[in-house]
């Protein structure tokens, strides 16, 4: 681990710490703003009962401008006192905005594809490899896969590299040989491409729907809000090409060039509503709405192999205003090609640890997609399509890591 990486995370609260801290410590790092505080004329956090037409009219086809929603930190003490216990879909709900994933929504998404043109399938999952960079925890999150062999004489160095030889002799008179994969003991779904469940992040003991962590925790997973509550997803996905926007505008102070020659948003770049609005307008696509999935493209995935330390040390991303906007839209989930969606710059967060995760997951029931790789789709100018993903049906698990797919059609170049 690089020293600067260690110091960076010592200066900020980790996800684990954000869950474990007591109410007093949480209040010490949280701003004292009241829950749902919004600027004059802005939509408040309770303003979620408007229909799609009213929401679109207020925010516009391409989304609202910065300053429409509040960027203030929520009141942790109020949350711990029950302020988030009655979500939009009712106390005890486990689906969150996945309630918006109706058969009608799926049908409308499919109609968005032009039946007269070929449909391309885009792989949005990260390519896994041993040692894939993962957020630090104890015990560590690992993807270490090794080949288990029966009936084959392996090549030199096979076992030295971690390969497992059961026997070089085939099984039975018909000489059956076998290969299987084996994983290290700390394998987790919480690595690389994933959809965080509503049981992943809370505020102290408070989780989505009024559930309490101390009541739903079991040795083998949670008794509520787990992967079994997700089900398959097939809905409209919208890619917001923020890095493409910056490159086209010549805003070189906002990005750098990775080792592979690709542009990447700066480590602590705060993505704003103005950025998202400009992306949708440039790409000629309607902003993501209820039951749909916004996917933010930053280029951050280009650091996974070339600079894993920098990849984990920080990330460009949204903050609370953008999170409140997406929650107001009732999107099914918010995704990005970064490992954690939200900006980590202390100048923006004031030392708060992952407050967008808390707001989206624990209050609003909006799941979070991480490490959605959108480079190929963006290269084809395919900015919308049908997002299909089936999270692992593992009761009590905290995320699904099956790779998403985007069914889309190469489109027109943006109007730069």
Image: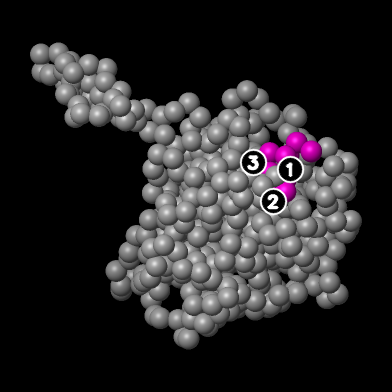
The residue drawn where x is 51% and y is 29% is: 186
- The residue singled out by tag 3 in the image is 200
Q: Is residue 141 magenta?
A: no
Point out the frontmost of discs 3 and 1.
1
Q: Which residue is mark 2?
A: 354
3D distance between C-alphas at marks 3 and 1 = 12 Å
Answer with mark 3 or mark 1, whichever residue precedes in sequence: 1
x, y (%) of residue 174?
A: 10, 18
Region in magenta:
11-21
Task: Identify the residue at horizontal 34%, vertical 60% (top origin).
Answer: 121
Q: Is residue 364 visible?
A: no
Snapshot quadrant of residue 334: bottom right
Q: Is residue 346 left or right of residue 380?
A: right
**Quarter of image, res 135:** top right
Q: State the CA–CA distance, disc 2 to disc 3.
A: 12 Å
Find disc 1 in the rendering and name its residue.
18
Secondary structure under the numbered disc 2 in the rendered image: loop
On screen, residue 169 versus residue 262, left or right, reads left
Q: Residue furthest front?
A: 3
Q: Earlier in the sequence, mark 1 or mark 2?
A: 1
For the residue labelled by badge 3, is the local secondary structure a helix, a strand or a loop?
Answer: loop
Q: Give coordinates of residue 3: x percent, y percent.
A: 60, 46
Q: Nearer the viewer, residue 193 or 163?
A: 163
């Amino acid at each position: 681990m690089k020293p600067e990486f260690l110091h960076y995370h010592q200066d900020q609260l980790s996800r684990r710490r954000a869950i474990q801290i007591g109410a007093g410590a949480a209040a010490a790092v949280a701003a004292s703003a009241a829950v749902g505080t919004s600027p004059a004329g802005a939509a408040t956090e309770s303003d979620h009962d408007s229909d799609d037409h009213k929401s679109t009219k207020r925010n516009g086809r391409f989304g609202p401008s910065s300053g429409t929603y509040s960027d203030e930190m929520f009141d942790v003490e109020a949350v711990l006192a029950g302020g988030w216990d009655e979500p939009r879909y009712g106390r005890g709900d486990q689906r969150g905005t996945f309630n918006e994933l109706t058969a009608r929504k799926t049908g409308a998404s499919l109609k968005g594809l032009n039946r007269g043109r070929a449909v391309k399938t885009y792989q949005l999952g990260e390519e896994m490899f041993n040692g894939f960079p993962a957020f630090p925890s104890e015990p560590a999150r690992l993807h270490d896969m090794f080949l288990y062999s029966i009936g084959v004489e392996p090549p030199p160095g096979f076992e030295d590299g971690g390969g497992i030889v059961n026997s070089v002799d085939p099984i039975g008179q018909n000489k059956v040989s076998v290969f299987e994969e084996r994983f290290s003991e700390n394998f987790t779904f919480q690595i690389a491409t994933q959809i965080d469940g509503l049981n992943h992040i809370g505020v102290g003991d408070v989780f989505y729907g009024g559930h309490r962590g101390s009541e739903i925790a079991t040795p083998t997973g949670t008794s509520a809000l787990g992967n079994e509550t997700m089900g398959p997803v097939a809905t409209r996905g919208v890619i917001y090409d923020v890095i493409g926007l910056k490159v086209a505008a010549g805003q070189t102070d906002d990005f750098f060039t990775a080792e592979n020659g690709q542009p990447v948003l700066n480590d602590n770049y705060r993505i704003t509503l103005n950025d998202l609005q400009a992306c949708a307008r440039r790409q000629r696509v309607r902003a993501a709405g209820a039951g749909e999935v916004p996917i933010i493209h930053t280029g951050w995935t280009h650091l996974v192999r070339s600079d894993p330390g920098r990849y984990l040390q920080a990330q460009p991303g949204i903050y609370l205003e953008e999170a409140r906007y997406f929650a107001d839209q009732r999107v099914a989930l918010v995704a990005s090609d970064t490992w954690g969606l939200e900006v980590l710059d202390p100048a923006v967060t004031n030392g708060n640890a992952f407050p967008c995760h808390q707001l989206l997951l624990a209050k609003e029931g909006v799941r979070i997609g991480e490490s959605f790789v959108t480079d190929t789709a963006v290269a084809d100018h395919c900015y919308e399509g049908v997002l299909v993903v089936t999270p692992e049906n593992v009761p009590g698990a905290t995320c699904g890591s099956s790779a998403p797919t985007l069914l889309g059609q190469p489109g027109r170049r943006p109007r730069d």
